Amino acid sequence: MSAATTRSRTPDRLCAEAVDLARAAAEEAAAPGVVGEHVEIVSEGDRVVTHFFECKEMGYRGWRWAVTVARASRAKLVTLDETVLLPGPDSLLAPEWVPWSERLRPGDLGPGDLLPTDAEDLRLEPGYTGEDEPPPNSPLSEEMAELVEAEDAEVSGVTPAGLLLAPMRGSIASVAEELGLRRARVLSRYGLHVAADRWEESYGPKTPMAQAAPAACVSCGFLNRIGGSLGQAFGVCANEFSPADGHVVSLAYGCGGHSEAAVMPAPPRPAPHVIDETRVDPFPLRPAADSGSVSEASDEAAAELGHS
């Protein structure tokens, strides 16, 4: 009892002293040698006390065996209530469970995986309404179709559940199916907004690539337009050298692979040669005579001849 500690509420004396009874119950639930030292006692109420023992089992570090004992009013016999393994304040616990719908991340879906969509998914809305359904007494009504299927089942022996219900003639669903446009649900306004926000976050005008781009995708020849309302703000990049190749990009996005922004530079003109090897330079063997000294020597010779 020296190692035991108590809380503010005073525990029952006889229940607090029943350490051996609590240990025997813990060892019966676990195994001998797995139950460690007595840690503390906690008063759970009148004549109800819980004894905590260390758990030495591998993989349960910090966990504790909790054994609750109690006694009846005016009784001296302490009885066992329950034994359970509980985590302690420093125990190793698994992370809080998160539903799969919240754990799912883009790229988690692999080949063969099925991703069910909630019937109340806010991203979707009905692709068509039943406003044009015929009255119940109409030959084209759903009730009449069920009667026809039941009669066919009597003849063919096939239950109505095994038959495929075809859209009613003249309804929006039948016309849409004939045109190949029938979809039970389509994107709602909320679904369009969240998709646009997600695409702009990856390939939008605020990304570092777009901030450094010479021009926007709206003027790029590699942009492939898409239909629908999202086609007014997004397209698909078809430049194999662009980081956004094959991705939906905002029309305000841009990269260095813009078709019209980069102009092929003209080849640089080479610098003139220091030594021109295409012509011959004369190199005289003797230095040329000074023209002034030659004329002076001619004048002196002419003067001498005149005097003679």
Image (cartoon, helix red, strand yellow):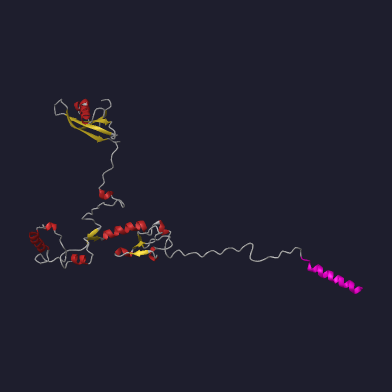
Does 100 sit left or right of 131 as displayed? right
Q: Nearer the viewer, residue 276 or 141?
A: 276
Q: Main secondary structure of the magenta part?
A: helix
Does 222 sit left or right of 191 as displayed? right
Determine which quarter of the picture holds residue 31.
top left
**Residue at horizontal 21 percent and vertical 66 percent from the top:** 178
Determine which quarter of the picture holds residue 262.
bottom left
Determine which quarter of the picture holds residue 302.
bottom right
**Residue at horizontal 32 percent and vertical 58 percent from the top:** 197
Q: Nearer the viewer, residue 293 or 34?
A: 293
Quarter of the picture containing the C terminus is bottom right
Q: Is residue 305 magenta?
A: yes
Magenta span covers which residues?
288-308
Q: Residue furthest front?
A: 156
From the top left corner, tell me how far across and down residue 132 is, in percent.
16, 66
Q: Is residue 302 visible?
A: yes
**Residue at horizontal 32 percent and vertical 56 percent from the top:** 198
Whether residue 217 is situated above or below residue 299 in the rendered picture: above
From the top left corner, tell me how far across and down residue 234 is, in percent.
34, 62
Image label count: 0
Q: Is residue 17 visible?
A: no
Q: Is residue 203 magenta?
A: no
Q: Nearer the viewer, residue 158 or 236?
A: 158
Q: Nearer the viewer, residue 249 or 110?
A: 110
Quarter of the picture containing the N terminus is top left
From the top left corner, tell me how far across and down residue 64 is, in percent.
26, 33
Does 180 sit left or right of 299 as displayed? left
